[in-house]
Amino acid sequence: MADTSWVKSAKSLKGVVLDMCGVLYDSGEDGGVPIPGSVEAVKQLKASDLKLRFCTNETQATREKFVAKLQRMGFDISVSEVFSPAPAAVAILKERGLRPHLLVYDGVVPEFDSVNKADPNCVVIGDAAENFSYQNLNDAFRVLIGLEKPVLFSLGKGRYYKETDGLKLDVGVFMKALEYACDTEAEVIGKPSCVFFQSVLNDMGIQPHEALMIGDDLVSDVGGAQQCGMKGVQVRTGKYRSASDERHPTVTADGTVDDLAHAVEMILNERGH
Amino acid sequence: MADTSWVKSAKSLKGVVLDMCGVLYDSGEDGGVPIPGSVEAVKQLKASDLKLRFCTNETQATREKFVAKLQRMGFDISVSEVFSPAPAAVAILKERGLRPHLLVYDGVVPEFDSVNKADPNCVVIGDAAENFSYQNLNDAFRVLIGLEKPVLFSLGKGRYYKETDGLKLDVGVFMKALEYACDTEAEVIGKPSCVFFQSVLNDMGIQPHEALMIGDDLVSDVGGAQQCGMKGVQVRTGKYRSASDERHPTVTADGTVDDLAHAVEMILNERGH
């Protein structure tokens, strides 16, 4: 029997934060496909009295293009509701006067148009997929090792994600690679950083204990949200893997549900919708 | 003033073990060039009463081709004097009945000709250089994550090495990447593994305290040899970097010398040659 005790807290919720890839849709070469029931589930949450935001470590495209893709899949989502690491990184770089060497997906480069990239004094990596070539990693390494103190930012620290053709290595893997190469520690921008979750809560104007995060990544989504004082529920879609996730050594989800549609149905039922 | 107290122990030495890349030669696109004085230094050691072996984590070619390259540079070296990780890995794989998925440099693949590679139940990575593409790393990851318990062997765990056109990421960086991706720990074959150093000492028929290792890698050569009970001297050629190596948090070389020629001159002088 699945543990459904988490849903008892649904009555005191004021807001829900949804991860995107693996919860709303499965990504892939063709842009991806919606996970069955998730378009309707988002619609139901929007029609309810709960606040709703989307929180993604997606860094393969600008936020505008990414949201347009989701809209084409049928999701009722606007850019202002979506929190992603690249805009957060741009703010940090400008605040600290840093000039990045970028190792990111081509599609996200325009997010950094307003940042000075000449004579770099730090490295920013995102999920660069095929751009994580040996040559590109070596170039980033040489920038870092040439600095008096290497400064490395990582847009998320996921291990892997699921595309329609299988699991794919995520940015965290290459963050660990460069950390080891330069004997340094990266600063993570995006989930599971508490600073990142808090910026979403601030935008909703609610407290952590009034918010629920729903994601497919046990460590980054669920664990990150819990560290920040939110509840975290995992869906059995996307990168979910029963063997490792349901007996993880450090993170235990407040609940595990089949998919987003199921989670939303339970939440709204409990709230008497 | 450089600390030369290590050379006092030269009188009680029975054997010397030399790292190759960065000590004998600098590698590069064209195969590499000898470091000035090192061809003569090897000749002098061979003419002395000291035993001599070569110990490399080089895994870009078969041992035969690698030794032939060094011979063309003018070094008096034979295959039986050279210890490298690939033959050691083949022995371990056969002993344990493991079938490897290989992520290595094309040139070293023939070392594994005698090993069954069908339906792989482990992954072996070496310094694969440009073969460390995103696609190839992802393929290795998928093999590992598909096993009940991922088994990963790494031929060495170096951070980087120096080629004629600059520093290049070494296998350890990609070992850390796959370790993080699969939440596992690799088994290292080669330096700095004590098993590997001990096999060299066994071949020389001497005890650790009777042997001196000379290398350019502080952690892998010097630290590894010291862990095994040998003395370890670092040369200021190859990947040596003054800032990080001469105030390293965990490894202190028994001595640091300009290059191999200088080290050999000091040793042979002390022994009264």
Image: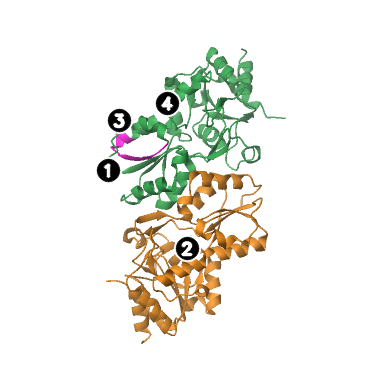
Chain colours: A orange, B green
Q: Which residue is mark 1?
A: B119
Q: Amino acid at mark 3?
A: Ser
Q: Amino acid at mark 1?
A: Asp
Q: Is residue B52 visible?
A: no
Could you confirm whether marks 4 and 1 are on the same chain? yes
Q: Which residue is mark 3?
A: B114
Asked if residue B252 is positioned above or below residue A110 in the image, the reply reads above
Q: CA distance from mark 4 to mark 1?
A: 27 Å
- Secondary structure of the residue carrying tag 1 is loop
Q: CA distance from mark 1 to mark 2?
A: 34 Å
Q: Is residue B16 visible?
A: yes
**Magenta segment, which residues?**
B93-104
* Between marks 1 and 2 in the image, the one whose residue lies nearer the viewer: 2
- Secondary structure of the residue carrying tag 3 is loop
Q: Residues within 10 Å of mark 1 (few under 14, many from 20)?
A: few
x 49%, y 32%: residue: B228
Dot placed on the residue nearer the N-terminal end, 1 or 3:
3
x 46%, y 52%: residue: A173
Chain label for disc 1: B
